[in-house]
């Protein structure tokens, strides 16, 4: 079983739609979690950290459920510019970061 | 804030040839440094990390090696490339609050 698993998609949604991605992790000792965004042929860039209490940044909301070991990302009012691959990341130990394979999102006009 | 430079940006190499990819970091001192590889259609795989000069931890046994000759320099090498070494190689260092900050990457195609 992979340490961090994501549905690869692609998720094709119309502009303005709300879309949600889930990610599960197997290492219950993982302390910190993040969502990264990766555009085609570019490096991943931090989208947001994920806190147990849930956190929101504009149209983006992240949730962490430690009991069920999953993380979610909700995107409201999707824009064409949101099209990208979204990577779920968890820490493993002091120095290591475990990345999911990513979920592809395509927002359609 | 830190800046990561990687070169070359793209590279096409024949099977069996050597490899040297370089990563340098500005704007921070004594950072932890990481090499990742992203193969086509796959997730980021941690290859090596370093907590200081001369200190290398290898995550996956393979055809590659890493060195850290200076505080802000991290080098990925191979003596003989395999087809399976093709991929997108990313250097990273810590960002604020436990995040990872990535360089622009080197796209390697082994033919």
Image (spheres, coloured by chain):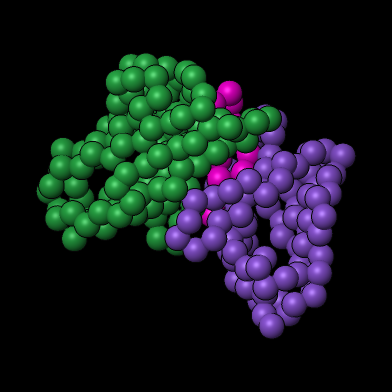
Q: At which x and y percent is residue A7?
A: 62, 62
Q: Residue furthest right?
A: A53
Q: At which x and y percent is residue A23?
A: 68, 52
Residue A11 colored magenta? Answer: no
Tell me, yes or no, if residue B98 can be seen here: yes
The residue at the point 67 percent across, 65 percent down is: A82
Tell me, yes or no, if residue A11 can be seen here: no
The number of discs equals 0
The chain shown in purple is which? A
The residue at the point 56 percent across, 45 percent down is: A99
- Residue A31 falls left or right of residue B17: right
The overriding secondary structure of the stretch rendered in magenta is strand
- Residue A89 vs residue A41, the one in the foreground: A41
The residue at the point 49 percent across, 51 percent down is: A43
Magenta segment boundaries in residue numbering: A89-101
Q: At which x and y percent is residue B44?
A: 47, 48
Q: Quadrant of residue B98?
A: top right
Q: Residue furthest left?
A: B16
Q: At which x and y percent is residue B76?
A: 30, 36
Q: Is residue A40 above or below residue A100?
A: below
The chain shown in green is which? B
- Residue B67 falls left or right of residue B95: left
Q: Quadrant of residue A6?
A: bottom right
- Quadrant of the image containing the C terminus of chain A: bottom right
Residue A90 colored magenta? Answer: yes
The residue at the point 58 percent across, 61 percent down is: A85
Q: Is residue B11 above or below residue B102?
A: below
- Residue B31 vs residue A63, the one in the foreground: B31
């Amino acid at each position: 079983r992979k340490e961090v698993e994501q549905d690869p998609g692609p998720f094709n949604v119309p502009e303005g739609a709300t879309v949600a991605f889930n990610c599960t992790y197997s290492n219950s000792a993982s302390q910190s979690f993040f969502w990264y965004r990766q555009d085609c042929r570019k490096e991943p860039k931090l989208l947001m950290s994920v806190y147990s209490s849930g956190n929101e940044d504009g149209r983006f909301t992240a949730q962490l459920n430690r009991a069920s070991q999953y993380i979610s990302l909700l995107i409201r009012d999707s824009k064409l510019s949101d099209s990208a691959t979204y990577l779920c990341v968890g820490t493993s130990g002091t120095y290591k970061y475990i990345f999911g394979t990513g979920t592809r999102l395509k927002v359609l006009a | 804030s830190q800046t990561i430079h990687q070169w070359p940006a793209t590279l096409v190499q024949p099977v069996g040839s050597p490899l040297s990819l370089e990563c340098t970091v500005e704007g921070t001192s004594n950072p932890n440094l990481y090499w990742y590889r992203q193969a086509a259609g796959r997730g980021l795989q941690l290859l090596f990390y370093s907590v200081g000069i001369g200190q290398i931890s290898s995550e996956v046994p393979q055809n590659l090696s890493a060195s850290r000759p200076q505080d802000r320099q991290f080098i990925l090498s191979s003596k003989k490339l395999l087809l399976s070494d093709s991929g997108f190689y990313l250097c990273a260092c810590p960002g604020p609050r436990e995040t990872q900050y990535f360089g622009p990457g080197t796209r390697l195609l082994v033919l």
